[in-house]
Image (tube, rainbow, N blue to C red):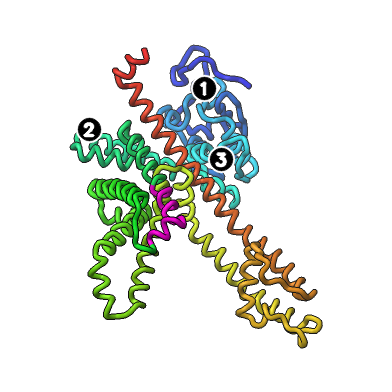
Amino acid sequence: MERRSKYVDPFCGLSGRVVFPWTLTLSRYLGVSQHILINVGGIRYAFPWSTLKDFPQSRLGRLCSCTTPMEVSEFCDDFDEMQHEFFFDRDPLAFQVIFCFLAKGKLRLSQEVCNVALHTELVYWGIDIGQMEPCCHHRMMSSVEAVAEHQRKEDEWREKRRVLKASMREGSLFHRLGEAVENPHSGLAGKVFAFLSVIMVVTTVVSLCISTMSGYQQEEATGHCSQKCRNLFLVESVCVAWFSLEFLVRFFHAQSKLEFARSPLNIIDAAAVLPYYVSLFLELKDESVQDIVAGTGRSSLDKLGLILRVTRALRILYVMRLARHSLGLQTLGLTIQRSMKDFGLLLLFVCVSVTLFSPLVHLAESELALNAARSPQHSFSSIPASYWWSIISVTTVGYGDMVPCSIPGQLVALITILAGVLILSFPSTSIFHTFYITYTELKEEHKRLWKEERGAELADPLHHSYYC
């Protein structure tokens, strides 16, 4: 491999040197049968000029028609008149793919060259990307689109962070408070607020579990409230007040109230806080409610009590608030949101399988089994009754409450279980791939936020002087 170590001006004539007659084109002067010498990244390639006739729009094809030094300099980085050698400061590995295409007419990917880098080189050399083999073209364009999408998200993220930083510097105290509530990585205040929010969620869940124990249930049934019951109510009231304050701050801090209302996490926050206020309103208005219900009968009072118990049970939605501070729960939520088509496909497969195997197991147990007429299976007495068995068998759960006893029924059960394993595995692969991509994206975003925060701390002169 020969590399050029010194730049030589190809357009200045020296004594005893053959100077190119620029009144002719390169191909006419050098001759059609003569070879063109290309030096790409220190590696030389030689091939006849006639090869470039099939690629007139490529960079090398347009180089053949050059008649002036200025035109040559537009298509190559350097030119040696003595050796008739053209120099290109490009990737030599990527040019090997292009060289094989010029020689054999086959444009394929190479394992040694990045797909995105090869796309850039093809654009530089003027090679039509559509001439690539279909499978290789699909892989390369997928890589290019993925990189472009990643770059677009990076630009959006940087622009968003720039706007937030500008608003933080110029905004009011309430705006800074909203930023601390919305973004735990905004600074020390955001971290403290996120820590307190997690403590409140854990406290609320623990108090809700304690309130369902037998001693508290008996007190609620008799209408007597002890000191422990009052303490639990006080703890829950403080936590709900904290969540309500956080919800209101985030609502007024949001730029678009409509997008805020459409967010799934915000809907969960509202659904978790609302049952407390509903139950509190019903308990405060207990006397008036009893007066209203007295004329309608006991059934209305029972329904009202059922509504109250259901609203209290909905307070378990506080657990979902941990998704704001947990990378795993955020990944799970985004994966479910992005995989709705896959879940729909999985549901379709399960429904079709249940519809197919329920009549088969009913037929096997009620008609084909020995002594089926004298002792029919009550569990599989009808096709709708066999749906439950098909569901738990296709999903590979198998509770054991319904079991086929005959040989034909067991054969149907074997086919059903094997089909269930295949049915669940097909969409699960796509869902797992989506989960992996989502987790990687969120982890990279958290890593960028940490680096940004760390860079801000190191740039702070007080922080620097403290560590120095």
38 up-or-down from 445: above or below: above
Q: Is residue 182 magenta?
A: no
> 192 left or right of 112?
left
At which x and y percent is residue 412? 73, 72
Q: Residues within 10 Å of mark 2 (few under 14, many from 20)?
A: few
Question: Which is nearer the N-term, disc 1 or disc 3?
Answer: 3
At x 27%, y 80%, the residue is: 295
Q: Which residue is mark 1?
A: 81
Q: Which residue is mark 2?
A: 169
Q: Is residue 213 magenta?
A: yes
Residue 52 numbered mark, or none: 3
Question: Which is nearer the N-term, disc 2 or disc 1?
Answer: 1
SS type, badge 2 = helix
Judged by its main secondary structure, the magenta piece is helix
In this view, the residue in front, 22 or 244, is 244
Q: Looking at the image, do the residues carrying marks 2 and 1 touch, with CB atoms under 8 Å apart?
A: no
